[in-house]
Amino acid sequence: MVGLWSWPRALVGGVLSAIAVGVPTDVMDNPLFTRMTPVRWWEVPVLLCIAALTAMWAALRPQRTEGVGSARTWGSSVLGALAVGCPVCNKVVIALLGTSGALGLWAPLQPLLALASLIILATAVAARWRLRGCTPETCPPTEGKAAPFQWQRDAEKSV
């Protein structure tokens, strides 16, 4: 189990995630982007949670090189950016719903998107955590997918 956690990878992953989500959404104040609506009270904590969970995911080093949870990590980061972004700054939302739809329909859905993003990211961290000690000999992949639980491997053998 030695060497399964990397503080430098955690730091880089967390900082890059915070910048990638926080700068374009202007939750992290910057001169590159302008936000039309003020940052809401829940957006900064969501950004910090996204950065912390991404740092945990990056810090865990699975012994297998299958990129466990990487699609979930990318997807949840994009979902998190949509969640904390300014509702009237999103060109796609404005094109589909208009300004009143962005504020009346999209903005109330954003906290739910944030929650979904955090849940998906937490499952990516959990998947990496479960496989932290797996090697190709101890946890062989099954049909291209990892079966991290013993009951899953037993069920597949009995079929």
Image (tube, rainbow, N blue to C red):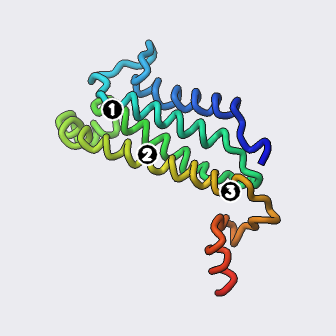
> Can you identify the residue that label 1 sits on?
42
Please state which amino acid type lies under the numbered disc 3: Leu
x, y percentage for residue 130? 64, 56
Residue 123, above or below 107: below
| Residue that lies at the very extreme toward the right in this rendered image | 137
Along the line of sight, the residue nearer the viewer: 31 or 16: 16
x, y percentage for residue 91?
34, 34
Q: Which sits in the foreground, 132 or 115?
A: 132
Q: Residue at x 51, y 48 (%)?
A: 122
Q: Residue 156: x percent and y percent?
A: 65, 80
Residue position marked by numbered label 2 in the rendering: 117
Q: CA distance from mark 3 to mark 2?
A: 22 Å
Q: Is residue 93 left or right of residue 75?
A: left
Q: What residue type is disc 1 on? A: Trp
Assess whether mark 1 and mark 2 are in contact (beta carbons under 8 angstroms): no
* Kind of residue at disc 2: Ser
For label 1, the SS is loop
Horizontal relation, residue 95 to residue 33: left or right: left
Q: Residue at x 67, y 64 (%)?
A: 146
Label 1 neighbourhood size at 10 Å, few (<14), some (14-19), many (20+)? few
Q: Which mark is residue 140?
A: none
For the C terminus, give its image quadrant.
bottom right
Mark 1–mark 3 distance (CA, rounded to whole Å): 32 Å
Real-space CA distance between mark 2 and mark 1, rounded to the nearest whole angstrom: 14 Å
Upstream in the sequence, badge 1 or badge 3? 1
Which label's residue is closer to the chain start, 2 or 1?
1
The image shows residue 139, relative to residue 90, as above or below, that is below
**Within-10-Å neighbours for mark 2: few <14, some 14–19, many 20+:** many
- Marked residue nearer the N-terminal end (3 or 2): 2
Mark 3 lies on a secondary structure that is loop
The residue pinned by badge 3 equals 131
